[in-house]
Image (cartoon, rainbow, N blue to C red):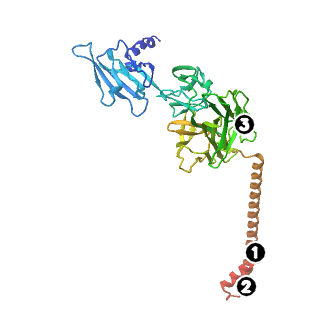
Amino acid sequence: MAHCWTGIPLILIYLPASAFTVQIKNVYFIDEVKGVNLTVPKEIGGTGWAWEWTPHHGRSERVRIAQVKLGDPDYSVYSWNWTSEINCDHFEAGAQGNIFIKPVFENAGLFTFRQIKPNNKVLAKFEVYAFKFFPFFWDPVKVGTDVTRVCTISRVKESMKVQWKHKEEPSSATQFNFNTTTTFLMIQNVQELSAGQYSCSLQINQTVLYSVHNTIRLEAPSQPAHYTLYRDTANQSKVQLYCSTQTSHNTVAWSWKAQGSNSATRRIASANRNQPAEISPSTHFRGRVRPMERVTGQSLALHIAPVTFQDAGLFFCDADSREYMSVTLITLQVSVEPSGGLSVGEEVRLTCTVSEVYETFQLTWLKDYSRTMLISKQETLTPSGAVRSLTLVIPSIQTHHQKWACAVFQGNIPRAFLPLRLEAKERHISVGFLGLIVCIGLFLLISVAALVFLMRRKCTRAQTCLGKEQTHINTPERNHRNKTSDLDIYDNVENIYENC
């Protein structure tokens, strides 16, 4: 026992320096805002060091940024030798071997400070995460419009989660992860409750590692405007129409023209100053439309739910019989073939259709891979083209083919997002059907056995008859017929078989 204990200090003494793990320190910066300074340990030892970098963007492996060494003969001076493989403009040399990372998104990655003289060992590690907003500046937005905000982080590990928050609470707006590192926030029909501070947080479990903030502000009522809204026809989708003028009017009204140049304009609702809004009884939206606020002569807001595919078209807001603003509504719908229940292994066709294409965009099918959504199929639709749908074929659906989404992208920004969940079940044979199969099998087995028995019996009788006739042929009474040919004998045998 004593020998075991005395061996422990010796083992510790002879362990190489690389055996001691250096803890990674997380560092964060915002793209184009403020860089970070990576500070090396005070007592670093040695006479030569190197900075190494493994970028998060994945376009290159670990590279050596620079070598640092003590000056000769002045050992208080550090000299830097930058590697030609990288853009040195993204980094700056600091005092005593420290390095400054400029606020460029592509600079994010794992940085290692290593001693290379007189021996090789890691002294410090820094994981530098970069955050990026799109758009960078958040301009004031019009009431009633849809807004998409984008938060991209250079790396999101499996243990991490990205979440949008509104006023420090999880946002109720639609948000989804895309390509692992990007999280979209989609706010429909921005209103006063939508305004305020938003944050994009990187967290592990419920612990926030870092957050970046920005604010949505509402634009004051100004000149007449036109904008486009996208709505799906599932999940009790809704659309809200806001009309707010700068001055007071006697009458404010909303009208609708269905998709198609030959459609007539129909009045949906109207209101006189300081009077309740009146919903047209014969409107296409009967039973699905209601006013949202008290009419003052300057505004009229309507709420339509649920949205149907046929609601697509142009909405007009008139103030004293003059058009003040308009909204284009484009609707989406998804179909699944075969309809009804799905069975594992069968072919499934998913089709996403848009009501109209007024501007070029990308119609996209996304597959949910638990932590993120990736593009499965995408096609560009144009106003001049005839294509209005995109079909995705799943050759053999499995139980893990559950979550999908149809999305409309303009550039890299989603304008519409329609999630779809599929349920594929294993095929099970019912007890009754299984019993039927067993009965048929038994019947066929008995039939085959009976047929074999009859065939064998027939052959046995034939052989018996043949034996008797052969005996008859060999008797002395027949021997005197020496001139009988063999052919006659065979003819007799055939007759025996026929008689049997």
Residue position marked by numbered label 1 in the rendering: 465
Residue position marked by numbered label 2 in the rendering: 478
Q: 442 left or right of 237?
A: right
Q: SS of the residue at dot 2?
A: helix
Q: SS of the residue at dot 1?
A: helix
Closest to the observer, 362 or 431: 362
Q: 157 left or right of 231?
A: left
Say which amino acid is labelled 1. Cys
Displayed quadrant of residue 312: top right
Closest to the observer, 479 or 111: 111
Q: Are marks 3 and 1 in contact (CB under 8 Å)?
A: no
Q: Which mark is residue 448?
A: none
For label 1, the crowd category at 10 Å Cα-Cα, with few meaning under 14, some 14 to 19 and many 20 or more, is some
Residue 361 visible somewhere in the drawing: yes
Closest to the observer, 438 or 500: 438
Q: Viewer-nearest of labels 1 and 2?
A: 1
Residue position marked by numbered label 3 in the rendering: 288
* Residue 270: percent from left, percent from top: 70, 34
* Residue 202: percent from left, percent from top: 52, 23
* Residue 213: percent from left, percent from top: 52, 22
Displayed quadrant of residue 111: top left
